[in-house]
Image (cartoon, rainbow, N blue to C red):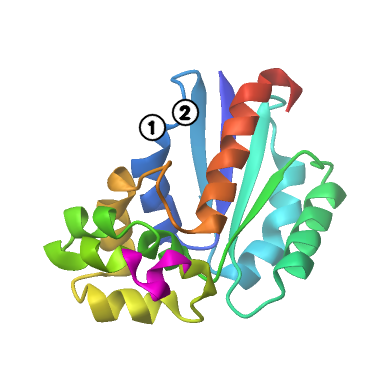
Amino acid sequence: MTQLVFCLEEPSAREMLKGLLPRLLPDTYEMVYLVFEGKQDLEKRLSRKLRAWQRVDARFIILHDKDSADCVELKQRLAQLCAQAGRKDALVRIACHELESWYLGDLAAVATAIGPPGLVKQQGSRKFRDPDRLANPYQELKRIAPEYQKVSGSRAIGPHLSMENNHSTSFTVFINGIQRLIADGANI
């Protein structure tokens, strides 16, 4: 059984993935979630964790929020940390700007999970056609879905996120990367 190890900067990402990944991954994959105490902790401890990992069949996926960083530089820095740990094959993915961009890319999932029901109508508006451009997606999500809380909201939304119809490009890149890992199997 291949082990997929998700290195995450916060618990909300783990909760979202727990709802999303069972619909994406075959039963032949074991999922492990390493949740760090924020992005600084992830960057500080990532190499050590990867280097110490004992399972040779483990594949690593690093998920990090872009926030205000330069996406290319951030991805290169994380990839370099993985390479230093001997894990050049780690998949590094950046949520632009925040994980909430992924939720704003699928307002039907948000409406189903936490409401309000009328959110779906807003998906066609200019703002939500490309949610990765929003500088503060968390605040935007709280404005349109006041019930949203980071951990419980992520837990509720994850099972409903559409892997085919999400308007967030960074979400699509994340899903495509995992699908490639599955397709490549042992040649990851």
Give yes or no for residue 125 being in the magenta stretch.
Answer: yes
Mark 1: give few (<14), some (14-19) or many (20+) Cα within 10 Å. Answer: few
Cα distance in 3D space between marks 1 and 2 = 6 Å
Q: How many marks?
A: 2
Whether residues under marks 1 and 2 lie with C-beta atoms below 8 angstroms apart, the answer is yes
Residue at 86 percent across and 51 percent down: it is 84
Residue name at image x 58 percent, y 29 percent: 3
Q: Is residue 106 above or below residue 177?
A: below
Rendered image: mark on residue 106: none
Q: Secondary structure at mark 1?
A: helix
- Which of these two is toward me, 41 or 93? 93
Residue 187 drawn at (x, y percent): 75, 22
Does residue 155 appear left or right of residue 131 in this picture?
left
**Which amino acid lies under the numbered mark 1 shown in the image of this protein?**
Pro
Queried whether the magenta region covers residue 152, the answer comes back as no
Q: Which residues are magenta?
A: 124-130
Q: Which residue is mark 1?
A: 22
Q: Position of residue 120 (x, y in %)?
A: 23, 61
In terms of depth relative to the viewer, which is nearer, 49 or 155? Answer: 155
In the rendered image, residue 15, in percent from the top left (x then y), is placed at: 36, 51
Question: What residue appears at the point 38 percent right and 42 percent down from the top-left corner?
Answer: 20
The residue that label 2 is drawn on is 25
- Dot 2 alpha-carbon crowd within 10 angstroms: few under 14, some 14 to 19, many 20 or more: some
Q: Position of residue 47 (x, y in %)?
A: 76, 53
- Classify 12 as above or below 14: below
- The part of the image, by quadrant, that contains residue 188 is top right
On screen, residue 137 above or below 117 = below
Asked if one can make out residue 116 in the rendered structure from this viewpoint, the answer is: no
Q: Amino acid at mark 2?
A: Leu
